[in-house]
Structures are given as C-alpha cells and as structure tokens.
Image (cartoon, rainbow, N blue to C red):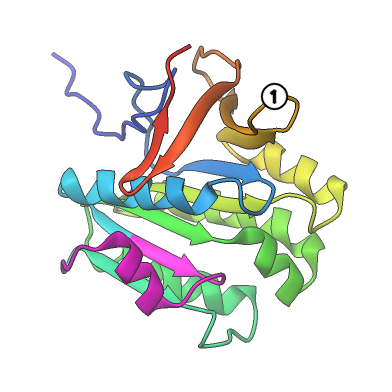
Amino acid sequence: MQAAVPGFKLRIPGLEEHVFPRGTIVLLTARPGTGKSAFAKQFCLEGLRAGERVVAALTDITADNFRKKIGVETSNLDVLDFLLEKPNGVNEISIKIHQLILKAPGKQVRLIFDSLSTLGTLFNPELLSPWLLDQRAKLSKTSAMVLALVIYATGINPPSVTRSLHTFSDVVLEMKTDETKEEPERQFRVLKARDVSHSARWIPFVITDSGINFVSS
C-alpha cells in the first residue's frame, strides 16, 4: 500500500477537501483595505491550531503588531520584521526566511509573506516575479513541508508584474469590494488552483475578530 503523502488543507470554500503538496505558493490579491490581513490572520491561526509552525515575513506591519493581532503566545510562531529592520535586498530576505524554515526539518510549516507589493516599492518591482519563482524552487526542495501565503496589493505595481505573479503561483485567490450593491459587499474567489477543480464564483464574506466568514448565498 502506498503511504499517504502529507500536505496542507487551506480550509477555504471550494478547496476544503483538497490537499496541497510542499512548496505550494498561494497568492492572495486585492486592493488595499479589502481584507487580506484578516485572511492572513486566519491562515496563521489555522496552522497553529493544527500544530504546524508558522513563519511570518513582514514588510507592512511590525512584528509586535502582528503578534497582537494573532493573540496567541506560542513557540511555533516565528516573525521576521522587515518593516523595522530594513533588508539590504531580496536575497537577504530569502536567506532569513529559509533559515527559519530549516529550523524544523520534516515539520509542516506555513509561511506568510506580507506583502509582496511592498517589496516591489522597496526594490525594483521587476524583481518580484523572479523572486517568487526562486521561492517556489526552494520551498519544493526543502526538508520541511511548506505552504506559502503571499499577500499582494493590486494597483501599486505595474499590471504586467501582477500578471506574471499569477503565472508563477500555484493558487491565486482574489478579494474585492462590490460597490454596485446598496451596501458595499466584500467578495472572495479562487481564480486559479493548479491541478484542482474549483469554482471561480465570487463569494460574499465579512470580517470578524477570528478572521473572515463566508456568507451563504
């Protein structure tokens, strides 16, 4: 009998039962203020509840503020604060991220990078696609099981950069605010999931203290 391959469940609509292998990169895109940080919090807490390690690499929020948002004190959470400790380049960021990941060989690790769009403002945005491709290669080869959530705010870097990031991501999630309704409504969809059948319909959601809740339609 073939041994079961360990993997990750995202626990999101349309993908609840699907298991993703090591090195999967999930790109979450939306305009600023739509709910990306709430989703990242939920992603982090789901991993900690499952006994996984979480590595958070931050350029948009300080480590202290991130820990306060998570509200959980645990040795399974490592935070890299690139907002206060300015990196010298994208290579330095990669090295520090993978040093933390390699602390737990063979263990399941969730990586949060918040955010890739800010990285494009710190350095050349044309570096984002090659950097993301390099992360995919490294994560698939590391001894740890890694699932990466990469946050990306649209409207900041050129559209061509955004399109190339879609190409190099295994899963692309989108959020938007529908202003055509009587009350503006936050919506979410799975735009792309490599080798997985899924629905691409927009799903309404609300932000709560514990993350985001999807509204039944």
Residue bearing the label numbered 1: 181
- The vertical placement of 24 against 201, above or below, is below
- List x then y, in percent, for residue 171: 55, 33
Q: Secondary structure at mark 1?
A: loop
Name the residue: 60% across, 46% down: 34
Drawn side of residue 201 relative to residue 162, left or right: left
- List x then y, in percent, for residue 85: 51, 88
Q: Is residue 100 visible?
A: no
Say which of 1 and 75 sits in front.
75
Say which of 91 and 56 sits in front.
56
- List x then y, in percent, for residue 84: 51, 87
Does 57 appear in magenta? yes
Specify the segment rendered in magenta.
Answer: 55-74
Looking at the picture, which amino acid does disc 1 mark? Lys
Say which of 170 and 142 sits in front.
170
Name the residue: 40% across, 55% down: 111
Name the residue: 70% across, 37% down: 167
- The vertical placement of 111 against 10, above or below, is below
Drawn side of residue 144 relative to residue 36, left or right: left
